[in-house]
Image (spheres, coloured by chain):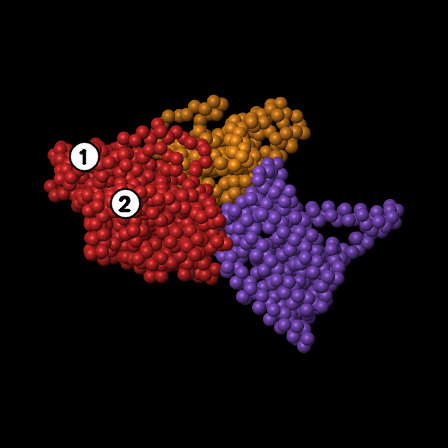
Chain colours: A red, B orange, C purple
Amino acid sequence: MTEQNEQSKPQAAAAKPAPAARPAAAPAAPAKPAENELKPRVLAPAEARAELVRLKEKEGMDYLENLTGVDWGEEGLGVVYQLENTTTHQRVAIKTLTADRENPFLPSVSDLWDIANIYEREVYDFYGIKFTGHPDMRRIFMREDWVGYPFRKDDETEKNNPLRMTNEPLADTTDSYILQQDGTITKETHNIFEEDEYVVNIGPQHPSTHGVLHFRVSLEGERIRKIDPILGYIHRAVEKISENMTYPQTLALTDRLDYLGAMQNRHALCMCIEKAMGIEVSERVQVIRTIMDELQRIDSHILFFSCLCQDMGATTAFLYGFRDREEILKIFEETCGGRLILNYNTIGGVMADIHPNFQKRVKEFIPYMRKNIKEYHDIFTGNVIFQNRAKGVGVLTRDQVISFGCTGGTGRAAGWSNDVRKHHPYAAYGKVNFNEVLRTEGDSFARYMIRLDEILESLNIIEQLIDNIPEGPFQEKTKPIIKVPAGTYYSSVEGSRGEFGVFLESKGDKSPYRLHYRSTGLPLVAVMDTACRGNMIADLITIGGTVDYVVPDIDR
Amino acid sequence: MKRPKIKNIPYKEFKDNETFEKLVAELNAKGTNVIVRKLDELIDWGRSNSLWPLTFATSCCGIEFMAVCAARYDIARFGFEVTRNSPRQADVILVSGTITTKMAPVLRRLYDQMADPKYVVAVGGCAISGGPFTKSFHVVNGVDQIIPVDVYVPGCPPRPESFLYGMMQLQRIVKVENFFGTTNRKQKDPYREEAEQRAEALYQQEEQA
Amino acid sequence: MFNFQDITTWIHGMLTGTLGLPEWAAILTESIGVALAVITLYAVFAIFLIYMERKVCAFFQCRLGPMRVGPWGTLQVFSDVFKMLTKEIINLRQTDRFLHNMAPFLVVTASMLTFACLPWNKGAHIIDFNVGVFFFLAVSSLGVVGILLAGWSSNNKYSLIGAMRSGAQIISYELSIGMTMLTMICLTGTMSFSEICADQAVNGWNIFRGHLPAVLAFIIYLIAGNAECNRGPFDLPESESELTAGYHTEYSGMHFGYYYLAEYLNLFICAGMAATIFLGGWAPLTIAGLDGFNEVMAYIPGFVWFIGKAIFVVFLLMWLRWTFPRLRIDQILSLEWKYLVPISMFNLVLMALVVAYGLHF
């Protein structure tokens, strides 16, 4: 296949439905292209790798934001790389693909970015693309005895995979594929764990993995030698089932990904669709969404505090956190009707206007929370046991967090300024003053303090906006059947625990062709091995608590 | 709104505790003698008031379970706050959250590991039927396909109040069990037999290896 | 002050005199009676302490705790006991079944033996002889054997790690307990618990008498005693969030119930010992010069004093447990070996000096 072929196809596809879809979707749609359209450059596999190396080395594109596998049907299977420069915050996208559906091979970039390791395993699991030079080509979400590659459009997943009640086989060896000089590909097998290692299973059902996550931990006494994460115990194939749903239907699933960032997740998808269709939401909606996002962030950070305390054995602090969280849930419940799963954002606005009590309650909540943060510091932060267990433990350097793509508090604790709200402002974030909380230590204590400081910062943002909610409609008029014009789109928001991105590939239908979420938690799990090596098994719990992942968001 | 019809139970938003209590009394009255029934009542009283849940949560409903344990809803009032992390010591497994096909054997194994008497509460839409993920190829459409369920608590996620209500229904189920008597003793569990056979086969395999 | 010995001698007299039993039969009957009394007391205290823990922890956490079973949830623990008694005990394959079944009994036996050492009242000692302190230290370390066996025989990695942690921790902290007890023996000059109490009834509580070194010893004893009971912040042998349930992960039904009971009883024994050695045991509070006050205090029976003091210390320990996060194994060991042991050694010397120069009150 040639490059010209590649480029002509999407354009042809784009040309066809566009005249019908665009004006229909948004009456006042401007002619200009959507601002979040990616327009990835299409390169042949070998060239793509060379270009990625060049971008990383020469242009400082050192952050692999997202790596999405896509099945383009007859064109072949491929991936879209999205890079970002961590100083200029410029974004670029590269697309590469292979037409071979039987034995697809692409060059690995796991030596350039650490996070590519886990992303490529995901693509292998879903699409069966094998990456040459990847050290550990195993399935990551599906069982090891799974048949077929479920995300391929032609895969007969349900037929080949009945419910198996046998215990899952877990291999102790892994394969890697090496591209030799003469173009042939050879397979090598290595051991994950040696014969005489003491391997303890933490999970899949374990109180401190915050869900169903499975770590195989190799121990030497109490010290950790290696961690092998096994994911997928809550893989619900949200991305796959979204492909058969209309756009408003897909919204419902986002809340259930990272249930502590329900508002932000849904905000990201709504924003992505709105921008792609050129819908302008009113100022009022923008401000409401911003306030809700920040309330959700406070909610999530309080839960982070609570769960960390619980994991470290301070049960009382856990309940103090929950006491305050209930206050936020009260606010949510009045306006949205839900406590945890809120279903509030819609395409073009929000589900219902804010409750008359909303402003009053939020204004009562701000001083209440400020007071209680002090209490948190008194009861837990200042505790000598906690300080000894957190300071200098699980240190991640700035280079490591960038290479692993650990956004959010984990990245900012290591000194990496990665706040999407600052660098790519959306909603009303461009209009408010707030600081991006940064620390440089990169240890568990810094990650903990970042979250508590962010609660205060979020309160500041809410305080600036709560009295200035402009008048306007809370919902724009949209067509009953929403069709996104053909193209590839990406939007991201600052979720509770990092950058939450939505990658949307549309063919102009009423349902997405490929919908991929940049998980905030997956990089955080990927980094666990690096952060935990050489530490005690008790530190695994602390580090896991402070990097703050939510498992359904990892598995999607 | 569609009003569900359940045999013997008037609707009235299911707030009708009297009917439930009467039902419990009726079930207990059949074919029991004085001494055995009294002893049974004592044991049922103990069991029903001391249902220790296993900390098991796969997704959103787990957070609501934590909220139930916290100050405002305080499950400790009923004596359920002793959450055990080891399935051997737990009495009830609250399946809160989606069960995927990869998780299914793990869940069944957890259930098999629990000591009798054991109860299952399916919490939330996902555990009952697959919820919003019914169409997914990787989601079990209802945990009753893999383990026997005693109480279903609907919601996505259920509110803490419904959690408590579900637990109270479970208490009623426990109260009609007979430990010494024979009339409505819990039947030999087909799931359990199957599990035993499987364990036996596995053991034989290991013996040979 | 009410002396319990009057009752015991009366019972003995009745058995030998009125009923005409020979000496050996009378003693046998009395022993059985005492054993039954100890077991009953053991169960009653365990139930009371579990209820207290659940209520105290609830109040610390702005909750109510058990409310529905009985008035104020007072019958909650009874229902737990009935449930536990009828719960299945799982036998595991590929484990050492004999050791697995024996381990919980070892733990309970050890804690019952130590429980019998407590001086309940004037004249109400069950085990009391001239090296009582040594006996107490010896039998209290039996429990660790039960824990190690439980970890080993369960054939479970979590259990094994938990048991190893527990072994390292308990054996280390025995040292501090021994040292602090020695410090106080230095002051009282006797190793018999009854004499320690009787001494304090006359001379005032040890914690006041021994001032600085006694207070220091009391604090070290509380820390070490807490660690000895495997309770938070030293609960890492069973650290719920790391090892699911530690050494008793594989135990179910009443076997687990024994561990559960022993945990709470050890807490009470630890507190009771603190009360005996530092806070005067059954000796009432007396303040020199206030005779009227002292007389009123003396009317309160000794067992009320003893139990009251023990419960007070239990409350202190619960307060600690529900406030602090858990320590890490290396921190626990360095706390003991780098801080507590040197301090208690120094404290012993200090106490010796205080006693030698008569600097105590």
The kind of residue tagged 1 is: Gly
Question: Which residue bears the numbered disc 1?
Answer: A508
- Residue drawn 15% across and 33% down? A17
Assign a secondary structure to mark 2.
strand
Near-viewer residue (A295 or A396): A396
Chain of the residue under the numbered disc 1 shown in the image: A
Viewer-closest of A413 and B43: A413
Nearer-the-camera pick, C316 or A178: A178
Query: Can you tell which mark lies on residue B83?
Result: none
What is the secondary structure assignment of the residue under circle 1?
A: loop
C214 is higher (above) or lower (below) than A72: below
Residue C273 position (above or below residue A426): below
Residue C303 is situated, as x and y percent measured from the top left of the image, at 70, 55
Give x and y (percent) for residue A542. 43, 54
Mark 1 vs mark 2: in front? 2
Residue C288: tell me if it is visible.
yes
Report the chain holding disc 2: A
Between disc 1 and disc 2, whose residue precedes? 2
Residue at 52% across / 43% down in the picture? B86
In the rendered image, which residue does mark 2 sit on? A179
Asked whether residue A271 is in view, the answer is no
What amino acid is found at the position of numbered circle 2 in the picture?
A: Leu
Give the x, y percent position of residue C229. Answer: 59, 54
